Amino acid sequence: AVAMAGEALSRVPDVQIDGDGVFKYVLVRVRGAGAVAKDVVRGHGWAEYHADLFERTAEELARHGLSCECLGGGRLSHRPEERKIHVYGYSVGFGRADHAVTTEKLQAEYPDYEITWADEGY
């Protein structure tokens, strides 16, 4: 079961965000069977609340036998024409995500981008 969970976990993209604009994001810890876990970033403009992002993510993961918890949220400003992403703000419901972790994930996904973060702002 642990090997299968690890495989299911490896298929979960580390980052899924909209290609452009300013939108909410959540940092989610995904767990498979056993102690296998990884953190993923989800950010989309359709989400009115951070909980919308988390619930959709949790539903998708549950179909693959994975569970998750929300580690916090914030906002992303994605400007592809400038190759920049700025991470900031917080979630009223989930608290502030660790933007340093989020920035690390984004940098791996967008290696040629300038990615910055700040605890200020909403």
Image (cartoon, rainbow, N blue to C red):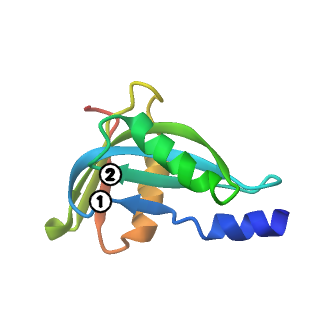
Q: CA distance from mark 1 to mark 2?
A: 5 Å
Q: Residues within 10 Å of mark 1 (few under 14, many from 20)?
A: some
Taking the spot 70% from the left edge, 56% from the top edge, the residue there is: 65
The first of marks 1 and 2 along the sequence is: 1
Q: Farthest residue in the front direction?
A: 63
Residue 91 location (% of width, % of height): 39, 31
Query: In terms of secondary structure, where does tag 1 sit?
Result: loop
Query: In terms of secondary structure, where does tag 2 sit?
Result: strand
**Above or below, comparing residue 5 to residue 112 in the picture:** above
**Above or below, comparing residue 122 to residue 82 in the picture:** above
Residue 46 location (% of width, % of height): 28, 47
- Is 21 left, or right, of 94 in this rendering? left
Taking the spot 44% from the left edge, 25% from the top edge, the residue there is: 93
**Above or below, comparing residue 51 to residue 110 in the picture:** above
Residue 39 location (% of width, % of height): 58, 53
Taking the spot 47% from the left edge, 47% from the top edge, the residue there is: 56
Q: Residues within 10 Å of mark 2 (few under 14, many from 20)?
A: many
Residue linked to disc 2:
44
Three-letter residue code for mark 2: His
Q: Farthest residue in the bottom direction?
A: 112
- Nearer to us in this view, 54 or 60: 60
Residue 107 visible, this angle: yes
Three-letter residue code for mark 1: Asp
Find out whether the residues at labels 1 and 2 contact each other: C-beta distance under 8 Å: yes
Which part of the image, by quadrant, shows the C terminus?
top left
Residue 29 location (% of width, % of height): 60, 47
- Is 14 left, or right, of 107 in this rendering? right
Residue 89 lies in quadrant: top left
Residue 98 visible, this angle: no
Q: Which mark is residue 18?
A: 1
- Nearer to us in this view, 110 or 36: 36
